[in-house]
Structures are given as C-alpha cells and as structure tokens.
Image (cartoon, coloured by chain):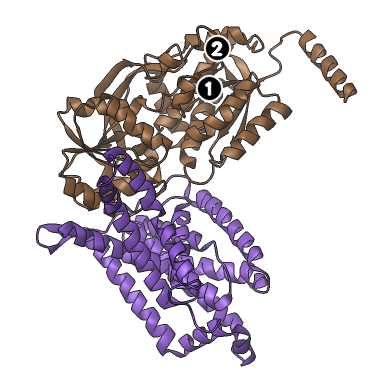
Chain colours: A purple, B brown
C-alpha cells in the first residue's frame, strides 16, 4: 500500500514535469498554429544555463532563474528570426525548420559547453527526505517539483481565464484572423506566447537538472512524451495539457511499476519481465491510440476550431 | 565503361610497379560518434588514437599514416555510408573507431567483405566474437559481456546472494545481464528492463526498495547511468544497498556529471588510470598534457588501437597489401598495452585481466577511479569456441 502511494507520487511528479513542457507547446500550437519540435532544445538550454550559473555562483535559485531567462531569450530569438516568416507556411515547413533547430541547438550546446554532461546537484536545503507516510521517506526535491508544477498550473489557469491577456489568448486560439482584424497586435502577442512557452520549458529543464543527466540531446526523449501529452489532452488546451500530463505520468509510472508483476501471474517470470517492460514503455502510446479512437480531438480540446 | 576499367587496370598495374617506398602514407578510416548523444565516447577514442599518432610525428610504428575521421552521429545508415565512401573514393583499407554494437554489426561485415580490415576500439558484439569472426577483425577493447561477467564474479566474492538487476531493454542490455548471470551464482531478487534513453527511474527505484535485495547490479550506459546514479542516491538507497556496475557508467565524463552520487561505487574495468605500468603512466600523463582532461577507458582503448596497428605496420614495414602477413603481425599484439599483459585469443579478442575499481575523490577534489581488486586474471570471452578461424 505504501509502495503504491509512493508510485502515485512518482507519477504525479513526472506528470507535472511533463505539464511544464506541454503547457508551452500546446499554447504555441493552439494560438499560433505552429508545430515547434525545438521545444525540447529550449528545455536543454534551460538545464545547461542552470548548470553553469550554479557552478559559478553556487545559488540554486539564481541558477533556476538563469535557466528560465536563457530559455526565454532563446525563444525570443527563435520566434523573431526563424518562426515569423513561417507562420503563413504549412506545418511541413515548420516541422522541417524546427527539426533543423534541434540539430543546430545540439551542436551549439556541444560547442559552448563541450560534449561531456554537466553536473547539477540538489541544493543542500532541498536534499532532505520527508516522511509523508510513516516509515517511507520521499525526496523533498521531488515534492517541491510537484508543488511548483501545480502552482504553475494554477497560475496558467488564472492567466488564461481571468486576465485580459488570457482573453486574447483564448480568442487567438479560437479565431486568429478575427483577433488580428480587431486590431490586436498579433506580432507582439505571438512573441509573448512563444517566450512564455520557452520560459516554461526552461523552468522544466532547470528543475530537471538535479534529477537527470544534463547532456546534449536531453530534450528529445521528453519531447516525444510531451507530444503524446498534448495529443491526448487536446491540442491548444491548457486544461487538456494538465489532464494529459497527469494521465501520461501516472500511466507510465504505474505501468513500469506493476505491469511485469501483473504479467507474472500469467507467464513465466523471465518472459513476464521482458514483455512487461516492453509493454510498459509502449503504454502511453497505446493510451494515445485509445483516446484518439474514442475522442479524436483529445480529451479536453480547445474551443472553436 | 570498358575504357574506365582498362584505365583502372593500367593505373593499378602502374601503382603496383612502383617501389614500395613509405612516401605514400597508409590511410586509416576512423568512423566514430562525434556529435549528439554519446559523442563523448567517440571523442575520447579519437583523442586517444590521435595522441599515439602525434607521439609518432604522424606515423604509427614508424610508418606514416593519414587518419580520415568522420562522424557517424550514432546513425547506422550513416556509418555504412561513410565506410563505403571511404573504401571507394579514398581507397581506405584499414578501419577503426565505431563505438556502438548496432553500428558495428551493420558496417563491419561490409568492410570485411571488401577485404579491408577493422580494429575495434570499443564495440564487441557476440556475433563478431563467435560465428561471424573474421581474420580481418580485431577487437582491442573487450567482448561486450566481459565487464558484466567480471561483476557477476565479484559480487559472489563479496558474499552477495540476492542481487537486483537493472538494464535497458535493448540487445546490449539483455546481453549484459546474461553476461552477469554467467558467473553470478546467487538468487536474482528482481530483473528490470527499462526503456532506452529513460530519464526518470523513480518507479523502478521504489519497486527495488520494496524488493529489499542485498546488492544492485546495473548496466545503464551514458546519460541513463547519470540519471540512475543521482536518483539512487537521492532516494537514500546508496547507504543501504551497495551498487555495482561495469565501467561504462563510471567514465570520467559521467563522474563529473554524477558527482558524489557515484562516490565509493565499485565498477569493473579492463583499464584504470592508476594501473601501474610504464606504458600507462606515460599515456595518462601525455593525455592530460595534450587535452587538459583525464583520460577515460575509451581514450585508453583508442590509444591501444593505434599502438596495436603501429606494432603491425612496423613488422610489415608499411606493406599492407600482403594481408596474411599483416593479420599475422596484428595477431601477435606485440605492443606495450596500457593494460599491461595483453594478448589475442583465437577469435582475435583480448585475453586480459579485469579489475574492480572504486570511485574516489582525488586531491584536486574531482572524482576518479582506482583499482581495489581483480575479478579475473587472463579472462577469455564465452564465444571464442564458436569461432572457426583456424580451419578457414
């Protein structure tokens, strides 16, 4: 039972991490109609910037802020230099351009930081283990990630539902041309949205630094999962991104934890372990297929398309 | 078409008629991973190899060489393309450099089929050590299973009999655990295959803690190893359950990224910076002077590949066209390996000692490895018996 609760927390933590990436990606697609494969590169830029600032200043908070800022800046540059001419073009052109950006950023990071992975440790004041259930500790740092992720989700909800900017975002997602016709400066709006998405990706990268290897190409694995999240949740919808992220986080974590055990009931242990882990790594894609068959536009699609 | 063939033949005749002066350098094609994930391995192999070339002033064994280096980007298709281009356009007949077994299994047979020779500085898949062994294929590093086998033996020696196993779900991962179990005699507390490139191990670690084994053996190369080491430490498991693994998760690049999470962990390797022999002392010092970083085991493998080739080139005086003589010279392995004792088995894979190292903090505060034990003396791989080179 304790183990199950711990696995639920693990799933929640993976879920909020995916949400930070998915929120930006889905906003960019929903409002600007842009497929951004380079979102994982912004995550990587966030992690690398965080690592170098941490190494030179020793302050984790400053380092995370630097990661967010660096990714936001990179996002701004990408938006104005590469994306702007591509808004009017088809998705295929955007996919090609942003795929090129992945290769570009991988090489750039290798040139700037070298081929070896960088080091980020959990700061001392977060390195503790908290006994949330008697007898079972859970790393405080992972709890903090859950907290930050949920706070960001709440903040995003407030931004989208309760502010003037959010109104523009929702209107933009519903009908881009009409928003422009009403005199809204879409250039500014698009730049802002892209930068916000980039900063969220940078935050995810910086927060992931102490848990994961900070290495070239680190954004690609998680990018695929992020796309699964926004497809499941409904492209363009923040609520969908949150629901999708939590679902994917849970299904992935619980699948990895329990599928081999479940299969052991019906198969030889060796086969069960092999098939179970293979199946567990496919589980989120199976989930995506089921959701798409049942609700082709995702669980909580954005309105108005 | 016919004219081209004729011209080609005439040219070839003209070339063979020339005296075998050492004026034309011997071309060596290095296909390795220099960009993207895992590039630090390829860069280390390249730098180790080129260090030996630079020490010989552009020659190996006194024979001038021209090393053509190309990046395969860890891509199977690209490695094949590069090999074919080098063979056709540059007429390269000696190859080395491939890091990954899946690339080696695709590119190396094509190289051998063209009667070129290949010296592997890293990948040692079972197929090439056993049934597909070839007189033109030499592995100077290890057969893939060797370091895992050594750890299987060592955990027996340490008295563990309930060990939990973790590896990625791909051929080398399954081979790793099979290699470990070939020598490990105790009970397997659990066997987990994770997905390739996985970042988050929280779920696996919670299950592992619940299984309460007395030791953990893991094979997670590259970034996966960094993820696992950090999270194992953060989950508070490192103090409770001892961790063992092959050197692939403990090279110099990984140690600097994993930090204290790796401190004290024991790992198996055929090489260590503190191996006490003259060749190794020279190598470690020269590598540090030249590149301003500590060499990894991959760098040592690149260096040994170059020096093995040098020993053979010197024996045949740069005459690489007589393949049998060249193969014989390589088979003798008459060079001072940084590993000390080194010789080839009948399948042209190493017979060598395998050590157990421990991660420790050096005087300058960085992490490195030092030898604490020896798991095997003169260890042979399990596939040599399947190789029928002698009868060929």
User: In terms of depth relative to the viewer, which is nearer, A129 or B60?
Assistant: A129
Farthest residue, direction right: B3
Residue B256, placed above or below residue A155: above
Q: Can residue B148 be seen by looking at this rendering?
A: no
Q: Nearer the viewer, mark 2 or mark 1?
A: 1
Quadrant where the image shows the C terminus of chain B:
top right
User: In terms of depth relative to the viewer, which is nearer, A162 or A123?
Assistant: A162
- Picture coordinates of residue A47 (x, y %)? 41, 58
Mark 2 lies on residue:
B312
Residue B56, placed above or below residue B163: above
Q: Within 10 angstroms of label 2, few (less than 14), some, or many (20 or more) residues?
A: many
Farthest residue, direction front: A266
Left or right: A154, with A28 as reference point: left
Q: Secondary structure at mark 2?
A: helix
Quadrant where the image shows the N terminus of chain B:
top right
User: In terms of depth relative to the viewer, which is nearer, A222 or A290?
Assistant: A290
Tell me which chain the residue with mark 1 is part of. B
Mark 1 lies on residue:
B119
Marker count (numbered)? 2
Farthest residue, direction left: A134
State the image quarter where residue B106 is shown. top right
3D distance between C-alphas at marks 2 and 1? 12 Å
Q: Within 10 angstroms of label 1, few (less than 14), some, or many (20 or more) residues?
A: many
- Picture coordinates of residue B288 (x, y %)? 42, 32
Residue at position x 48%, y 67% in the image: A293
The mark that comes first in sequence, 2 or 1, is 1
């Amino acid at each position: 039972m304790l183990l199950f609760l711990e696995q639920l927390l693990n799933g929640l933590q993976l879920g909020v991490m995916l949400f930070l990436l998915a929120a930006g990606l889905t906003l960019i697609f929903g409002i600007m109609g842009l497929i951004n494969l380079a979102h994982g590169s912004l995550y990587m830029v966030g992690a690398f910037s965080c690592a170098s600032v941490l190494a030179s200043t020793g302050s984790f908070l400053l380092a995370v802020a630097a990661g967010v800022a660096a990714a936001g800046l990179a996002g701004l540059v990408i938006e104005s230099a590469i994306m702007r001419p591509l808004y009017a073009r088809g998705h295929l052109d955007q996919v090609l351009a942003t795929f090129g950006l992945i290769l570009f950023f991988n090489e750039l990071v290798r040139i700037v930081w070298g081929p070896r992975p960088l080091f980020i440790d959990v700061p001392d004041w977060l390195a503790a283990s908290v006994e949330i259930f008697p007898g079972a500790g859970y790393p405080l740092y992972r709890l903090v990630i859950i907290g930050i992720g949920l706070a960001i989700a709440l903040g995003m909800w407030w931004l989208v539902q309760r502010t003037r900017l959010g109104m523009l975002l929702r209107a933009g997602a519903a009908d881009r041309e009409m928003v422009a016709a009403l005199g809204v400066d879409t250039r500014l709006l698009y730049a802002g949205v892209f930068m916000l998405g980039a900063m969220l990706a940078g935050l995810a990268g910086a927060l992931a630094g102490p848990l994961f290897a900070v290495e070239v190409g680190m954004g690609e694995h998680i990018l695929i999962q992020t796309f699964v999240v926004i497809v499941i949740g409904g492209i363009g919808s923040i609520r969908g991104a949150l629901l999708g992220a939590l679902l994917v986080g849970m299904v992935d974590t619980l699948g990895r934890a329990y599928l081999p055990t479940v299969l052991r009931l019906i198969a030889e242990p060796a086969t069960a372990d092999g098939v179970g882990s293979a199946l567990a790594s496919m589980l989120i894609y199976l989930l995506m297929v089921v959701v798409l068959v049942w609700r082709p536009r995702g669980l909580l699609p954005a309105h108005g398309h | 078409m016919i004219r081209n063939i004729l011209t080609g033949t005439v040219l070839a005749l003209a070339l063979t008629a020339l005296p075998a002066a050492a004026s034309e350098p011997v071309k060596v094609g290095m296909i390795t991973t220099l960009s993207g994930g895992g590039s630090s391995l390829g860069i280390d192999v390249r730098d180790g190899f080129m260090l030996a070339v630079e020490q010989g002033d552009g020659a190996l064994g006194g024979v001038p060489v021209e090393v053509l280096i190309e990046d395969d980007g860890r891509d199977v298709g690209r490695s094949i393309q590069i090999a074919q281009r080098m063979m056709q356009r540059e007429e390269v007949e000696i190859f080395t450099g491939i890091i990954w077994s899946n690339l080696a299994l695709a590119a190396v047979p094509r190289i051998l089929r063209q009667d070129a020779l290949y010296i592997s500085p890293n990948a040692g898949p079972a197929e090439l050590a056993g049934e597909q062994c070839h007189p033109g294929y030499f592995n100077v590093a290890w057969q893939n299973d060797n370091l895992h086998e050594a750890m299987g033996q060592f955990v027996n020696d340490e008295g563990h009999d309930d060990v939990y196993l973790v590896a990625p779900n791909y051929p080398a991962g399954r081979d790793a655990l099979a290699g470990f179990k070939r020598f490990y005699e105790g009970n397997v507390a659990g066997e987990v295959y994770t997905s390739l490139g996985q970042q988050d191990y929280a779920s696996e670690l919670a299950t592992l803690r619940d299984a309460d084994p007395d030791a953990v053996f893991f094979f997670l190369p590259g970034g996966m190893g960094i993820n696992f080491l950090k999270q194992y430490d953060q989950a508070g498991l490192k103090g409770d359950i001892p961790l063992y693994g092959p050197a692939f998760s403990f090279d110099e690049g990984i140690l600097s990224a994993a930090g204290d999470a790796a401190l004290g962990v024991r790992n198996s390797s055929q090489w260590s910076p503190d191996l006490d022999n003259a060749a190794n002392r020279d190598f470690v010092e020269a590598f540090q002077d030249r590149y301003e970083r500590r060499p990894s085991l991959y760098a040592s493998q690149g260096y040994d590949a170059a020096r093995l080739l040098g020993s053979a080139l010197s024996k045949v005086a740069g005459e690489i066209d007589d393949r049998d003589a060249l193969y014989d010279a390589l088979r003798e392995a008459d060079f001072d390996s940084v590993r000390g004792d080194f010789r080839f088995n009948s399948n042209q894979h190493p017979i060598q000692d395998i050590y157990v190292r421990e991660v420790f903090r050096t005087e300058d505060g960085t992490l490195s490895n030092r030898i604490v034990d020896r798991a095997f003396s003169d260890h042979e791989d399990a596939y040599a018996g399947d190789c029928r080179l002698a009868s060929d």
